[in-house]
Amino acid sequence: MASGIKDKVAIIGMGCSRFGERWDMGADSLMVEAFTEALADAGIERDRIEAAWVGNALDDINVGNSALPAAHSLRLQGIPVTRVENMCATGTEALRGAAYAVASGACDVALAIGVEKLKDAGYGGLPLRTKGLQNDLWMPYGSAPGTFAQLAGAYAARHGIDSGDLKRAMAHVSWKSHQNGVLSPKAHLRSAIDIDKILGAPMIADPLGLFDCCGVSDGAACAIVTTPEIARALGKHEPVTVKAIQLCASNGWEMQAGQWDGSYVPNTRKAAARAYAEAGISDPRAELDITEVHDCFSITELVIMEDLGLSDEGRAPTDILDGRYDRDGAIPCQLDGGLKCFGHPVGATGLRMAYEVYNQLLDRAGDRQRAKVDFGLTHNLGGTPFNSVAAVAILGRGK
């Protein structure tokens, strides 16, 4: 019977480019920026890498439909290089491919890298086909803000929450992330914003205001993985290990059945339950030290806290306002500022989240460092609440 990949894979090196409006660089250069850091961190030669997975979701212009641009840019000679795409979970999907290859014994050292160059599309959100990039399967039911505004409305209706109270909790989500982003040198947005400015911002899709929405950025991030035994032989005596990676894709039930009221994301709940079981975590509220979740909109982070089992149903707004997920709270969320401050270059996001958890686990996060970090969780939500791919990864120290 399958037992999962817990403690079968160690991360020996990670890298992350600076995220932002990188007009000075193409996707190839962004990958090189992240890869150079990861290779130095791993302390190995390039030719030790035996296979690579490249995550890229929308960037058909800059990257194309194959993995060849990554193979060329990173000089990955004579090894299998595979491009993967799974909506906003693309970066975590690349990590899953590399981790599974090592766990299976197919190779000893593998690379996962994700990149996106969205600013070149000239579009203030996920690009549309009319802007030069294919997007017909991503948002067929309306805009991203529009669909997540529906999540907010359904959540408020289910739990009987006043619109003003919900907006205040959402504003705290954004406020908290901006406070954290100030301490994150690679973030796109690094300015603290007060609650009144967030609440008074122009409306995008009620109840989502301007500061409830993440921005658009360019960026890349990557990980080099191997076995724990090889990691220790390289001098990494208590390496960061993968405790779980789980992914759950919608089969269309949300749009076809009357049992779902639109107030939560079923796939996140399923992926989280599987990840906790794989990692051996029985009480995530007590055992998880930090989280990086898919805060494409502030309401998304709020709902995710319940979908991950970190808040009771209907209690996330109260927990958020009480500071449970603040930097000094019980379970800090987005210590680096999250999508809110990094933006969302789709192929890179999942690996960027893992990069923050990895550095926290190694006590290398500088001013953002949490005093005690044994387990960290990352979460991606691809598509919409109505048609989604959810990915949950858990990283920890040693075996």
Image (tube, grey):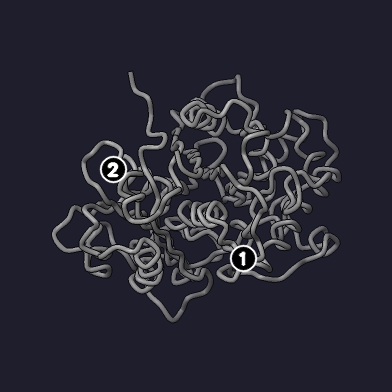
**Residue assigned mark 2:** 102
What is the x, y in percent for residue 229? 32, 44
* Relative to 30, 370 lies left or right: right
Label 2 Cα crowd, 10 Å radius (few <14 / some 14-19 / many 20+): many
Nearer to the camera, 187 or 109: 109
Q: Is residue 231 above or below residue 313?
A: below
- Left or right side of 168 for 366: left
Q: Is residue 212 above or below residue 96?
A: below
Q: Residues within 10 Å of mark 1 (few under 14, many from 20)?
A: few
Return the mark for residue 241.
Answer: none
**Which residue is depicted at the point 55% across and 69% down?**
186
* Residue 379 figure quarter: top right
Point out the tag, 2 or 1, that comes first from the N-terminus.
Answer: 2
For the N terminus, which image quadrant? top left
Q: Nearer the viewer, residue 155 or 113?
A: 113
Q: Residue furthest left?
A: 78
Q: Amino acid at mark 2?
A: Val
- Residue type marked 1: Gly
Q: Is residue 254 visible?
A: no
Percent of width and height locating residue 273: 54, 27
To which residue does mark 1 refer?
366
Q: Is residue 74 above or below residue 259?
A: below
Quarter of the picture containing the C terminus is: top left
Residue 273 visible within the image: yes
Q: Quadrant of residue 155?
A: top right
